[in-house]
């Protein structure tokens, strides 16, 4: 089995139910059946027999899962023996480009100050 990171830009590195459904070749209902959720508790305690989502701030937040948790679940609960995690870098966005430009400028300033000393 090969797990890839199928995340949205705003939740980089996390997988939604649809992505898990695709990589585990299971139905949406099957994924929900194994998901650690509770209608009375927003973030139930960790359960090693279930698929544990990332912490949510409110009940309307989408269920998102870390690829390592999906791999653990596939291996330990579903008994899928060969599990590989491949985290793909998300496409660069405007914020990342701006941060890279700021870093480059700060590095140039640092080098200039170091040269003057």
Image (cartoon, rainbow, N blue to C red):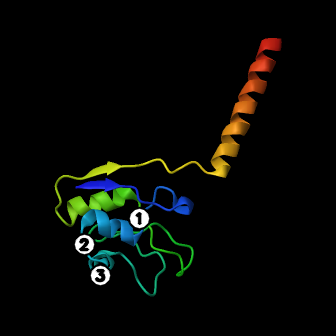
Q: Which residue is mark 1?
A: 65
Give the x, y percent position of residue 79: 16, 62
Within-10-Å neighbours for mark 1: few <14, some 14–19, many 20+: many
Q: Quadrant of the N terminus?
A: bottom left
Q: Viewed as shown, does residue 45 lie left or right of 102?
A: left
Residue at mark 1 to residue at mark 3: CA–CA distance: 16 Å
Picture disc at residue 73: none
Q: Give left or right: position of 15 versus 79.
A: right
Mark 2 neighbour density, 10 Å: few (under 14) some (14–19) many (20 or more): few
- Select label 1 or label 3 by which is in front: 3
Name the element at disc 3.
helix
Tell me the distance, in whole angstroms, between the alpha carbons under discs 3 and 2: 8 Å
- Residue shown at 38% from the left, 71% from the top: 17
Mark 1 vs 3: CB contact within 8 A? no
Q: Residue at x 52, y 81 (%)?
A: 59
- In the rendered view, tell whether residue 48 sits above or below residue 95: below
Which residue occupies 35% across, 60% down?
A: 69
Q: Which residue is mark 2?
A: 26
Q: Position of residue 37 (x, y in %)?
A: 39, 79
Residue 77: x and y, percent? 21, 66
Please tell me which residue lies in front, 4 or 37.
4
């Amino acid at each position: 089995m090969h797990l890839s990171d199928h995340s949205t830009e705003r939740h980089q590195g996390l997988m939604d139910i649809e992505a898990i459904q695709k990589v585990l070749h299971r139905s949406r209902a099957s994924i929900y059946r194994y998901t650690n959720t509770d209608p009375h508790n927003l973030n139930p305690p960790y359960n090693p027999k279930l698929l544990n989502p990332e912490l949510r701030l409110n009940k309307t937040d989408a269920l998102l899962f870390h690829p390592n948790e999906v791999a653990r679940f596939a291996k330990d609960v579903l008994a899928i023996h060969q599990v590989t995690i491949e985290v793909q870098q998300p496409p660069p966005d405007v914020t990342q480009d701006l941060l890279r430009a700021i870093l480059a400028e700060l590095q140039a300033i640092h080098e200039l100050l170091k040269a003057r000393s």
